[in-house]
Amino acid sequence: MIKLPPGLLEDFAGLIAIPTISSIDPARDMSNREAIDLLANRLDDLGFCVETMPVADDPVKLNLIARLGEGENGLVLSGHIDTVPYDPSAWTQDPFVLTEKDDRLYGLGAADMKCFFPLVIEVVRQLELKSPRQPLYVLATADEESTMEGARRLAGSGRTLGRHALIGEPTGLVPARMHKGIIMEAIRLSGRAGHSSDPSLGISALEGMHAVIGALMEWRDELQSRYRNDRFSVPYPTLNFGSIHGGDNPNRICAECVLTIDLRLLPEMEFDRVRSELHSRVGRAIEGSGLVLSCNALFNAIPGMQTDGDAEIVRLVEKLSGRAAGTVAFGTEGTYLNAMGMETVILGPGNIEQAHQADEFIPMEHLPPMMDILSRTIRHFCLEGR
């Protein structure tokens, strides 16, 4: 039986009880203000200087920046407070009630990643920090699960925080210092409708998209021969054809067709160059066809992240976890923290396989070792002589 501090469970249950769904669908999107207020109150009680940063003109979405101590080379413990939407019919218990069962804690966002903040609060409470040599920051961001606008707004603010950062995303307690970048694009071809009995009456967008797909498959092969990084389990860039929609009837020439694609790029690949190549390949595939092309990003691209393997925080968490820092397949806010001058590592309890799933859970056995890693990391960067 795994025993956890009552205060940790109380804070965890409080966060789980507050819906903080982030979605590109306005009908599902929610404010995170109540959850930010809960964290702000807890951290204020522990002596932190607490600040909230509106993410948009209408301040229903907030970042929280809490600081304890003064200096320039402190530690940032970072995570997002939002969750993805959920399907009520797929859950076997209330997603907004923290439920303990079989040494697991269930709830929407339990693994990804509401558990991280109660762990941080409990560790700080136990350390009884008063006057750290270097500052400790706790950062909670908005909209990581949809647009990453919270991290984008923070990175674009021109401010600086600490020198070292740990993002508590679920990695199974294995540190990571790299992840791929993500581009999602909609390719739209517009032609002309006409009766199917005479092809000369129209211009088929569906046939044009066939040529586009062929050209992109060839380009994908070229990218995969050009770029490789064996640190990743899939060591090359990928291009996935996610959906295709076109036409309305078999006896009518298709006037419009839309293809959506997902590109996962290695950290060293330049986004602007790749997107330019993409548009060029598509344009050449339909050259002379009479089709009109438009390409639109489905969301702001997430750059890849890469932190030097010799960075102090990487070496420290490798030692504390007993595992070499590797890679993760999912995107994080690490690239924005690195852009602010931090050296960032991703390390947290829980497993990404449970994220975005019904009956999401975190193993209780992950929590004590994560608290130990957090405690020793805070001691190293904020308390010990440097």
Image (cartoon, rainbow, N blue to C red):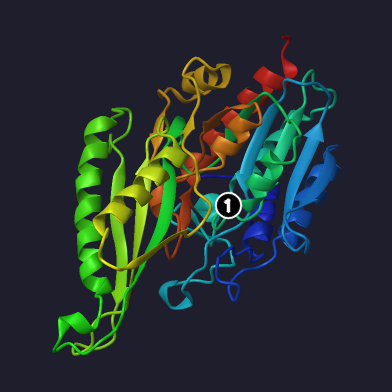
Q: Quadrant of the image for the C terminus? A: top right
Residue 119: name its quadrant: top right
Q: Which residue is drawn at 44% across and 64% down?
A: 359
Res 326 → quadrant: top left
Query: Is 243 on the left or on the right of 377, as rendered?
Result: left
Nearer to us in this view, 208 or 339 = 208
Q: Is residue 25 above or below residue 366?
A: below
The single residue placed furthest to the top in the displayed view is 386
**At which x and y percent is residue 235?**
28, 34
Q: Where is residue 316 in the image (x, y as percent from the top left)?
A: 54, 19
Mark 1 residue crowding within 10 angstroms, few (<14) / some (14–19) / many (20+): many
14 vs 4: above or below: below
Residue 196 at x, y percent in the picture: 17, 87
Q: Which amino acid does label 1 sit on?
A: Glu
User: Is residue 163 shown left or right of residue 93?
Assistant: right
Q: Residue at x 25, y 51 (%)?
A: 216
Report x, y in % for residue 204: 24, 75
Q: What residue does disc 1 label?
A: 144
Does the image show residue 5? Answer: no
Residue 124 seen in this snapshot: yes
Q: In this view, does 325 lie to the left or right of 71?
A: left
